[in-house]
Amino acid sequence: MKLAGLLLAAVVLSVCDRPPMREADHSKHDHTQTNHGVMDHSKMESSPGAADAPHVLQFIDTMIAHHQGAVDMAQLVNTRTNRDEMKKLAQNIIDEQRREIADMQAWRKEWFGDAKPALNMDFPGMKTGMAGMDYVKLAGLKSNEFDVEFIKQMIPHHEGAIEMAKALNADDEKYADLRKMAEAVIKTQSAEIEQMRGWLGAWSATQK
């Protein structure tokens, strides 16, 4: 299996089991494992045969990878911002999306057993959410410059998640909890986008 395939499998199947990423160790990580944060998100590849997998499985595997990208970005915030509101937003993102990842992994196991990864980059919203992510650039910034860049990357990432959640087709009653989670993604991340847009207008002006 190609390196990309191994990486995608690790992200989907074991991302919740890893400890928080240590930025100083970037060059030492085995990229075939779970070091999702340092990969170029815009160059992620679909799992082999993902488009032929059940729609719900595609959604789960793709959203897990998408959520983990947001968590990795949010973990940078505490050491780079001077703003308490940014720290609060980041912690909310980490807490909410880690919980949703754990739920999706449990549902995946219950509904699909040991099915092969089905991360689909063509799932509606996935490319939108990942295209502008640049973890390396973020990691090199501090204070207001970091805050502005973080928001510029996180807004489209959230928009991608909302598009994905709206595209979910899971009418079977057994998927009721997944549908509720998708609704929560739409509500929560829409509110966070509105909040970030307000900050972006004010904070961008301070850099001019």
Image (cartoon, rainbow, N blue to C red):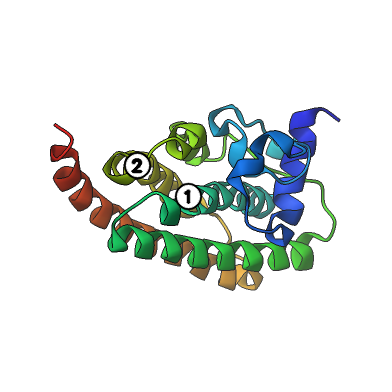
The residue lying at 27 percent from left, 44 percent from top is 144
Query: Residue flagged by tag 2: what amino acid is it?
Result: Phe
Q: Circle 2 — which element? A: helix
Residue 52 in sight here: no
- Which image quarter: residue 112? bottom right
In the rendered structure, the answer to whether residue 114 lies left or right of residue 107 reads right
Q: Which quadrant is home to the C terminus?
A: top left
Q: Nearer the viewer, residue 154 or 84?
A: 84
Label 2 neighbour load within 10 Å: few <14, some 14-19, many 20+: many
Label number found at residue 146: 2
Label number found at residue 169: none
Q: Nearer the viewer, residue 69 or 177?
A: 69
Query: Residue flagged by tag 1: what amino acid is it?
Result: Leu
Residue 19, compared with residue 116, is above or below; it is: below
Percent of width and height locating residue 88: 36, 65
Q: Nearer the viewer, residue 156 or 184?
A: 156
Label 1 neighbour load within 10 Å: few <14, some 14-19, many 20+: many
Q: What residue does disc 1 label?
A: 76
Residue 195, compared with residue 7, is above or below; it is: below
Percent of width and height locating residue 115: 82, 52
In the rendered structure, the answer to whether residue 167 lies left or right of residue 208 reads right
Residue 156 in sight here: yes
Percent of width and height locating residue 55: 64, 49
In the rendered structure, the answer to whether residue 31 lies left or right of residue 142 reads right
Q: Do labels 1 and 2 touch, CB within 8 Å?
A: yes
The residue lying at 59 percent from left, 44 percent from top is 23
What is the C-alpha distance between the residues marked 1 and 2?
A: 9 Å
